[in-house]
Image (cartoon, rainbow, N blue to C red):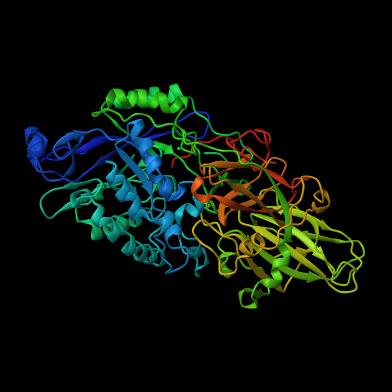
Amino acid sequence: MARNRNTRTTTTFFFTLFTITAFCYFTPVFGFASSPSLPSHSHHDHSQHNQVTARKFEIANDMFWKDGQPLQIIGGDLHYFRVLPEYWEDRLLRAKALGLNTIQTYVPWNLHEPEPGKLVFEGIADIESFLKLCHKLGFLVMLRAGPYICAEWDLGGFPAWLLAIEPALRLRTSDPAFLHLVERWWEILLPKVVPLLYENGGPIIMVQYDTTKVRLFQQIENEFGSYGNDKAYLHHLATLARGHLGDDTILYTINGGTREKLDRGTIREDNVFSGWLTHWGEKIAETDADFTASVLEKILARNGSAVLYMVHGGTNFGFYNGANREDESVYMADITSYDYDAPIRESGDVDNAKFKALRRVIKAYSAVPLPSVPFNNEKTGYGRIHLQKKEFLLDIVDRISSTDVVESGNPMSMESVGQMFGFLLYVSEYAAKDDGNILYIPEVHDRAQVFISCSSEDDGGRPIYVGTIERWSNLTLGLPKTECVSNISLYLLVENMGRINHGNYIFDRKGILSSVYLDERILNQWKMIPIPLNNLNEVPKTNPIIQVAYSEFTDVSAHRGAKENVTKEPAFYVGRFSIDKVNLVNDTSISFRGWGRGIAFVNGFNIGRYWPLKGPQCNLYVPAPVLRHGENVVVVLELESPNAELVIDSVDQPDFTCASSKSNLHRLEQTTYTM
């Protein structure tokens, strides 16, 4: 991109988002940003930079300047919402030992406002404490405030309740109804940022023209050039940000490296200029350490600034993982781990080739000596955990308050009935035919397990599993012939596997989004029953996990009574293990080899989804702060096929070798995605 010039000064700068990608190669994404004109002496008189004493960040002479001294940004993305707060300092100190001077993080709107008007800034959502900790440890911060963040995060950071609004919002556009909600959110978020600006004594980088004007280096939107061309939307965001943060705010965006994407994502008049994971069924992403380090060295040798995406990936705890979709038939949900093959691994490990190679390069260009490298955190395998089947998932329906059940002639989306994550149960009934029935659902997001029951049968109508309808195959399903004097009950348990976070299909409602056809006729009269399960920072009012976890528990051996408990009907399984007080509580991982697919909770905390049959992730990471001395409780919601012995294992290492790397699950040719 040509430099912008005027009669007063040239103020472009060279900046790189250096991306550690999840695929077989990586793409450095280059960008240039321009600020409004600086006073002419900033361009010509270098000595004055050395005399400045006020806290000041500026861009001049194709360089960053902090407090009058040249600054080469060597940064990395580390997302506070993918790391437990108890580990924020640990991970930041490891980034410090790598040689970084800047931390970049997103702000996911959906984490902080999970329901309209319900604001959360505590625990893992305590962004102010995270930013203050960055400052305490000597980091500068580049804040990526959204409102859209991508980040392989559910719906790209937008709250799911936006999808329930009618008429439908046009996300990431200048739709007035959408902008009104963005304004309301930023009116809450941005005032929290102001005291943390660099000029105000905080870590967030900015430029100060004089004693009254402040510039913040903050991202506006994200990868908009890959999505749209609505410049009015970007202008509005820029104006809104400056209204809270200062008229001369320096803003930036990040886009793919093509000319088309840069042009669509850039708003030159506002001086905002723009600069890539693993799905289920794929091989775990890895990039070569030496190759990665060599490209970083080329950037730093040219006096370029760089940000590693990611320096530490962390974990998609709860239901917040995202997904990708490139056409109508392709849907790819992200795994729970966000390890990202980053130099600081998911559990914080730094004793690896990539960390060493990058540190060696950064050390040669660092303006200060690097801290010593910390040891890897201790990890412990607490051994085999025997589980008991406690309750079928469908049996908790009887405990759902009737006020939470929604009835409608046609199925409604999850968002429309207020169930934003996890599962929604759709219930209807039909009259049996002598030769069975054919079920067809044109649009289900994302996976529907189908059960039928007959209340007049001797077993009292225990639901029978008949098959699964999946978004990426969407085949018809034959319902078996059933002798029933009454109507047959039909249960469709629909799982939200993660909303699309990137591209033109981001408006990704969940649940059943079409009519349901039985023998080519529309099936009417539905009940939608929410299944309340813990999300990352939310505990539902009705919590079957707690009820199941602390119900009466009888010890069982590894074999006695296990095999007869195996069933295709989703069920809760509970196990316990103890940590002796004489031992430290350390990180662990839980291996789900031999199980089907489902969700696991440790001491009430949702550690994420498992699917070893599809892979590649076999184990779920359990940080030590989730554990405790004494008894620890594991609750597993297995959806399909529990291990025949009903055992899981607490082990001391991650494992990404499950299933086949050539799985045909909704695969797409490997593609580079920008973050």
Task: In this rendered view, identify the residue nearer to me: 591 or 228.
Answer: 591
Q: Quadrant of residue 223?
A: top left
- On screen, 487 above or below 499? below
Residue 324 visible in the snapshot: yes
Q: Does residue 415 appear to the left or right of 148 in the view shown?
A: right
22 sits to left or right of 85: right
Question: Residue at coordinates 79% horizontally, 53% vertically from top-left?
Answer: 567
Q: Is residue 72 above or below residue 583?
A: above
- In this orientation, which residue lies closer to the viewer: 500 or 395? 395
Up-down: is 535 above or below 345? below
Give the residue drawn at x 64%, y 65%.
547
Asked if one can make out residue 1 in the rendered structure from this viewpoint, the answer is no
Q: Position of residue 522 (x, y in %)?
A: 74, 68
Q: Quadrant of residue 620?
A: top right
- Residue 270 lies left or right of residue 84; in this view the side is left
Q: Where is residue 635 drawn, in percent x and y?
A: 64, 54
Q: Pick the quarter of the image with the C terminus.
A: top left
In the image, 201: left or right of 591? left
Q: Quadrant of the N terminus?
A: top left
- Circle count: 0
Spot occupied by residue 636 in the image (x, y as percentages of width and height): 66, 53
Residue 116, position in %: x, y? 45, 68
Q: Residue furthest front?
A: 582
